[in-house]
Image: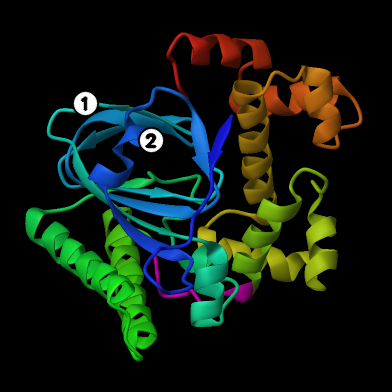
Amino acid sequence: MKTIKFHKTDCGVDFLLNVLPSEEIKENYLTKETFNTDFFEIVFFKSASGSVILNQQEIAIKDGSIVFISPFQKRKWNLDEKELDFKILAFQEDFLNDFFADKLFTFRLLYFYQLDYPLLMEIDKNSFEKYCEQLTEIKTELIATKADSVHIIRSLLYYLLQKLNRQYAQANNLSIESLANNYAFEFKRLLEVHIKEKQRISDYTDLLNISRITLNKAVKTQFNVTATNLLKQRLLFEIKNSLIHSNRTIQEIAYELNFSEPNHLMRFFKSQTGKTTTEFLDNYQNGIIS
């Protein structure tokens, strides 16, 4: 599978961030192939018609759609080239961590690493234009860099990401009141790093040096599910990804994900989905995405 890597801007600045218009990168969004990237993307579709398969879900794309994509999320676009017009805010995680001195910053943004809610938001024309104006300001600072450009970009970017977060929370009835809940977000970060080799809650309480009760309380407060549910959800997503996007056998996937036997993986999958792995793959290949 093709992975598109981030290229530093040619703007004379060493930022792992860029604002890209559709005319520069449209070919990547017109391909029918599945691919991923090593950076975050927020895609602002001013004019569009079609869909994308992302996070194993088919998402309809239309005018005023904003799509949120995390690094290495596999996607397959199906967009009509006619009147396709969009902008992308692209950046790597290290950029935000350095910029805001918070290694959990991207995990506090509700639209990234999201498995429960849509990775898309539809907004009104006025709001969309305001976001595009901010993107234009960021691009201007990247192209015509001055001594204070870093501070202006930081403030514009922080404002943009947080406004999107507030609007996303409102659209999906999510709370942003408890975003200082570090144990919950650190647990979510650790799942992204260790899910292939660690599938017990005790593995993560050891890493966090906290009790199971403390972790569960933090996760329940922030995400309204138990820590066990969040772990199982992330593991199931990993299994589905391997089934869909690799040529590995069930046995190979089971051992890669630290199941002692393939039968244990199949029982886990059936208990979580109500389907066998074969039934799931047959449905997916026949266009039934769930």
Q: CA distance from mark 2 to mark 1?
A: 13 Å
Q: Which residues are magenta?
A: 175-182
Q: Position of residue 41 (x, y in %)?
A: 41, 52
Amino acid under disc 1? Asp
In the current view of this chain or complex, which residue is farthest to the right?
Answer: 260
The image's mark for residue 28 is 2
Q: Tell whether 232 sits left or right of 96.
A: right
Q: Tell whether 13 sits left or right of 197.
A: left
Q: Which residue is painted at 71% across and 54% down in the image?
A: 193
Q: Position of residue 220 (x, y in %)?
A: 58, 62
Asked if the stretch drawn in magenta spans residue 206, the answer is no
The front one of 29 and 113 is 29
Quarter assignment of residue 29: top left
Q: Main secondary structure of the magenta part?
A: loop
In the current view of this chain or complex, which residue is farthest to the left?
Answer: 126
Give the mark, 2 or 1, whose residue is nearer the N terminus: 2
Disc 1 secondary structure class? loop
Determine crowd level at label 2: few under 14, some 14-19, many 20+ residues with C-alpha closer than 10 A: some
Q: Tell whether 256 sits left or right of 18.
A: right
Q: Which residue matches tag 1? A: 80
Disc 2 secondary structure class? helix
Quarter of the image that includes the N terminus: top right
| Residue contact at pointers 2 and 1, CB within 8 angstroms | no
Amino acid under disc 2? Asn
Q: Position of residue 133 (x, y in %)?
A: 16, 67
Which one is closest to the eye, mark 2 or mark 1? 2
The front one of 157 and 173 is 157
